Amino acid sequence: MSTTERIRMVAVGPDDTAERAQWLEALGHAIDSSSFCLGSEVEKFEAACKERLGVAHAFGVSSGTDGLKVALSAAGVTAGDEVVVPAYSFFATASVIAQLGAVPIFCDVDPATLCIDPAAAETLISPRTRAILPVHLYGQTADIDAILKISLKHRIPIVEDAAQAFGVFHRGRPAGAIGTVGAFSFYPTKNLAAAGDAGMIVTQDDEIAHRVRQLRVHGDAGGYNHQMLGWNARMDGFQGAILTLQLQRLDQRQAIRQRNVEEYLHALQEHHLTSQVVTLGRTAGSDHCWHQFIVQVDDRDQIRNQLAERGIDSGIYYPATLPEQSCLATDRYPSDGLVAMFPVAQRAARTVLALPVHHRLLEGDPTRVIQALAEIVGNRRGN
Ligand SMILES: Cc1ncc(COP(=O)(O)O)c(C=O)c1O
């Protein structure tokens, strides 16, 4: 049953005292085995991920951002190269490209899913394109069937930003390892959550794996023999220990997210809100882990404030497109031309609203959120 308690946007940390005790015990194992930087706790987690996802290689790294940077570098992206990337995502999707001295080439997104629009992406490919970087935004894959075709046709590697899609499969293949290489984030609000920063790189490709293994540790081929410029991008043992525990709870928590979404969709229908509160479409062939449950609304800021007054938190992921970020802006993306260049992404940045969907919501909470939305939207119509 629902209560009138505040409905929070995120649920981080252990759920209860029993889980807290398990976390402490797991951290104790890491301490006792002196497994601090990589080591046995990370190896255990990597093995569990390989088995769960059916991937040949899984590397624990220090964050999703570092994972993407190493993955791009392993795929051959270097200074001066171009990487085609959606105009709408978290900042790190594009900043890692720029950090490597490469150039993010922004692409508009599909109005149904807000993931990269493959047809638009193909028009952006040039002789300098070194990779295409789809983002599996909000927990379902981008249209990876179409992106694979482009990749094959133009012989361009795919580096997947699967930060929001751990454990998601597309036609039986695991997000992150459908293309050449991909990275997950285990930031504490993700569906698989660490107790700090952590991430993972996955690939089915032995040659890429060989490069990742070295790039994660300063490009060290072993014995302080550095054949390439890498980074310190190691996952720490504490995160490995916590993540192994978290992985055991993933399915149970996933089922609650799914239940929440079903309740949202049912309540939206019941309140006849589906035209004012627009939900996103589904990518054909993809599962969904519901990292976020997204709606698009006009007058978003007012709606958000009024939800907050009714004890309901919400989020905006993301309030600006990537070419709007001043440190990524270039002459190629004049601020007065962005709406014409990226109509879908620019509109998304003004209308997207994330509603709470995490595993600590109670049955009835999504209905309460939609009832509040109905009241707010209804009042507006009456004005
Ligand atoms: C789409 C996307 N890309 C990259 C990242 C970066 O991951 P991290 O925060 O673990 O560095 C995130 C997570 O915040 C993300 O959501």
Image: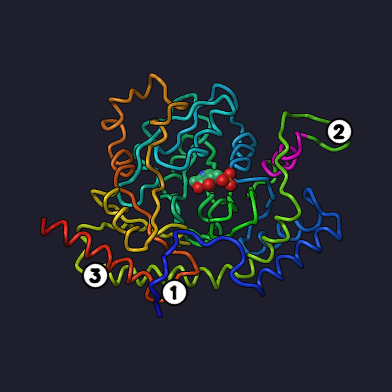
Residue located beneath label 1 in the image: 362
* Residue at (28, 25) in percent of width and height: 336
Q: Distance between the residues labelled 3 and 2?
A: 62 Å
74 over 314 or under it: above or below? above
- Number of numbered discs overlaid on the protein picture: 3
Q: Which badge, 1 or 3, comes first in the chain's sequence?
A: 3
| On-image quarter of the C terminus | bottom left
**Colour scheme shown:** rainbow
Q: Which mark is residue 224?
A: 2
Residue that label 3 marks: 269
What's the CA distance linking mark 1 and mark 2? 53 Å
Tell me the quarter of the image containing the N terminus. Answer: bottom left
Locate residue 382: give its quadrant. Answer: bottom left
Q: Where is residue 163 in the image (x, y as percent from the top left)?
A: 54, 49
For mark 2, give the secondary structure. Answer: loop
Magenta stretch bounds = 208-219
Residue 15 point in image, percent of width and height: 59, 69
Q: What element carries label 3?
A: helix
Magenta stretch encompasses residue 290: no
Amino acid on which the number 2 mark rests in the picture: Tyr
- Would you call the spot at circle 1 few (<14 residues within 10 Å), some (14-19), or many (20 or more)? some
Name which of mark 1 and mark 2 comes first in the sequence: 2
7 or 64, nearer to the observer: 7
Name the spot of residue 4 as percent of width and height, x first: 38, 72
- The residue at 64%/69% (across/down) is 248
Q: Position of residue 229 (x, y in %)?
A: 72, 28
Q: In this view, does 83 lie to the left or right of 51?
A: left
